[in-house]
Image (cartoon, rainbow, N blue to C red):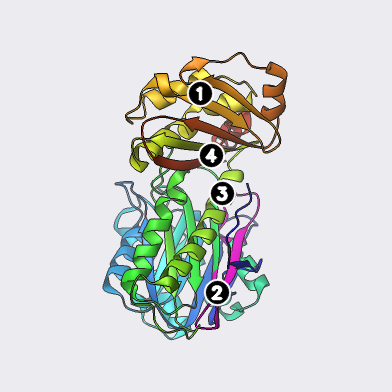
Amino acid sequence: MEIKSAGIRNLKGSITSPKGYYATGSHIGIKECKKDLALIFSEVPTKAAGVFTSNVVKASSILWNQKLIQNQNGARAIVINSGNANACTGDVGTKDTEKMATELASCLGVNKNQVLVASTGIIGVPLPIETIIAGINNTYKKLGNTNLDGQLAAEAIMTTDTHPKQISVEFTIDDKPIRIGGIAKGSGMIHPNMATMLSFITTDISISSKLLKKALKKSVDDSYNMISVDGDTSTNDLVILLANGLGRNSEIREENEDYFLFKKALHFVNLFLAQEIVKDGEGAKKFIAVKVSGAVSKKDARLLSKSVITSNLVKTAFFGEDANWGRILAAMGYSGAKFNPVGVSIKFHNGSHSIMLMQDGTPQQFDEDLALKILKKNEITVELLLKEGTGEAIAWGCDLSYDYVRINGDYRS
């Protein structure tokens, strides 16, 4: 399910690809041996936008970032630790978040209110703050602007991820090359409305804060908020977007052609990272897209696609390579969306083969061998065709395997 978009060039770079950004990552001792501290820095102040977890229980870093982005202090840097979520840690956690920002600000010669903070890992355990402070002091000196430096940061934010997730793209505005770069982490506790995933996006475009925030919110709704690995919404999830203006285009202040090109490129980046998160779902063997068309509205289409992709019975059926369409119809039924089951058609395909399991509410006699051939593939699309209206949506998810239980049963071990 390759993502393509005209006018946007995939540079196969990282968060350091746009002008003026530096990054790095290192092992400082939060984890036994893997990298666990990442830094991102802009050489000039940026406009910042963010979307944060919908969980009522929010980590102190989320609250810190929400305040900073609302106040628009011209963000300069981000410090991220992995291995410890610093969530549900009371006043100590709040103070430790500020200490992380203060220390990096001191190292870089900026204001602490220009430093965003993110944490991921185990909930309810205080940060080893002295280890982190020492790590920041040692790591900031390694900041660089190569693809390798960006990859080091992508590796350092990982927890149960099996590989780093990164991308960069380029497009043209005012005859000037504009770039967007991004890194993300996420493997488990992934569910629509922001879950255990972190995503950091940089761009050198010049754009108003209002339009930057609008573009990010719209893109998140149709990318990260349409994925699910296990139905759990975390305390720490966020997407942060920085724009430093060093691309030197005329500032975008209205929803014109340049804005829509930027919005398309931003969505290309977010959709790629969101799908990479799903493909790396804990123990996942199959990448599944659920496409709904003909719903009453887009809202109803979103409800239907997300309900199906979130269903544990559906997910386990795909793991078992069982064409159990009844589970899909049942998940649609409790989604909260309005539809008439008599008008539903259900189709599976994998690019080279397709099979209709239900048509206009009537079960179809189908070739079990062909169905198995489709279900054995690593990437499968489920099409749900309704006759209610013009609403469309796509959600992405994965199967649920034995390994998911093993990975999460051993998480603190």
Separation of marks 1 and 4 at Cα, in angstroms: 13 Å
Res 213 seen here: yes
Residue matched to label 4: 397
* Residue type of the residue flagged with mark 4: Gly
Local secondary structure at mark 4: strand
The numbered dot on residue 275 is: 3
Three-letter code, disc 1: Leu
Q: Nearer the viewer, residue 254 or 91?
A: 254
Question: Bounds of the magenta span?
Answer: 155-180
Q: Secondary structure at mark 1?
A: helix
Residue visible at 48% across and 52% down in the picture:
197
Residue occupied by mark 1: 313
Q: Is residue 226 above or below residue 243?
A: above
Q: Of callouts 4 and 2, which one flags the residue occurring earlier in the amino acid sequence?
A: 2
Q: CA distance from mark 4 to mark 2?
A: 28 Å
Indicate which disc residue 179 carries.
Answer: 2
Q: Earlier in the sequence, mark 3 or mark 4?
A: 3
Residue 93 locus on image (x, y percent): 35, 58
Badge 2: residue crowd in 10 Å (few <14, some 14–19, many ≥20): many
